[in-house]
Image (tube, rainbow, N blue to C red):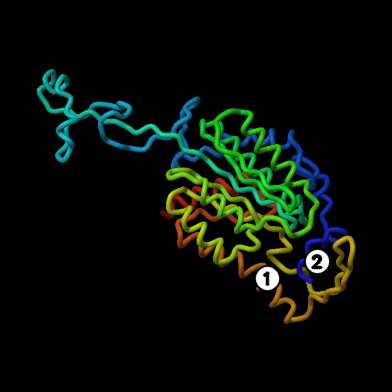
Amino acid sequence: MFDKLKTFLRSKTDSSVRNGGDGDGVHVTLPELLAQKRFVPLLSFDKTGFSKAEGLGVHRSPFRGRGMEFDEVRAYHQGDDIRLIDWRVTARTGKAHTKLYREERDRPVLFLGDFRAGMRFGTKKAFKSVVAARVLAALAWASREHGDKIGAIVMSENHYFKIAPHRQMRRLMEVFNAVITAADDDGTAGGATLEDALAELRRVSKNGGRVYIVSDFYGFDDECKKHLTYIARQCDVVCVQVFDVLEETPPPPGTYRISDGKRSATIYTDDKKWREAYEKMFVEPRRDLESFCKSRHIVYIALRTDGDIVQTVRRGVLTAEEKR
């Protein structure tokens, strides 16, 4: 019965689902994904590892050692490696000076975009699938503008795309085309699971990388937790959970006729047991996910379909950093 709530669109869907936002709120288009580039300035997270330097495609982590990229010379501090003393500057100034180096390294960014059947639902502003596509595109643009290698796993009921990380523009277009295809998939449940995608993400993620998971996280079970725990040990992970207002709060008490396009049923939302079951179905899993992420130092962002996508993501990442 609860699955049929996801078709509660005909009687309750806000008209803004079809008329508002970047597109029609139902379908994902390439112009819409390209337009998300305008949000890049708002998604430059200095404190979270993004570099502000324009045109630089590397992330720099402080690292002292030989054979690395030279950074600067400063006065010798007790405990510095004596092998790194700059004897020329020391002789000229009469005071010991040390060479500092920084390790220059790529930070591959991987996206997991979930566009399974449950994502094609929404009662306010846009479907979850459309919101997920927009936020994934905005973050992908921000990553590319900083020179990161971008890769993705994009899944739906009938499609499963694996795109290896690369810095070329055509790779970003591959990701966008995969998102468009997956988001438009009208298949029913039965394709790849979230556990399948996380297992693959675990296999391809690299130490020191960044991972964005954009999903409603339905089906997030113990096996999923095992994979995500492993990934979080070696990567910075951001989980963006997309949900509809109807999945946050049950509809007002009353009688509702719902349909999945083939079958129909009547639900009575004034029933106490029904409302308790509703909360267990939607609210408790979200609390569990948030608690899990917090325990694994994973950034968790709750994104409602009628919310401000970019500001919610930005605020979520920066708030998480301040708490660390």
Q: Which label was assigned to residue 315?
A: none
SS category of the residue bearing label 2: helix
Quadrant location of residue 263?
Answer: bottom right
At 60% from the left edge and 53% from the top edge, which residue is drawn? 197
**Seen in the image, is 74 located left or right of residue 236?**
left
**Seen in the image, is 79 located left or right of residue 252?**
left
Q: Amino acid at mark 1?
A: Met
Q: Which label was assigned to residue 4?
A: 2
Residue 209 in the image: above or below residue 252? above
Quadrant location of residue 248?
Answer: bottom right
SS category of the residue bearing label 1: helix
Residue 220 in the image: above or below residue 166? below
Q: Amino acid at mark 2?
A: Lys
Label 2 crowd (10 A; few <14 / some 14-19 / many >=20): some
Q: In the depicted view, which residue is nearer to us: 182 or 294?
A: 182
Q: Which label was assigned to residue 281?
A: 1
The x and y percentages for residue 99 are 23, 28
The x and y percentages for residue 80 are 18, 37
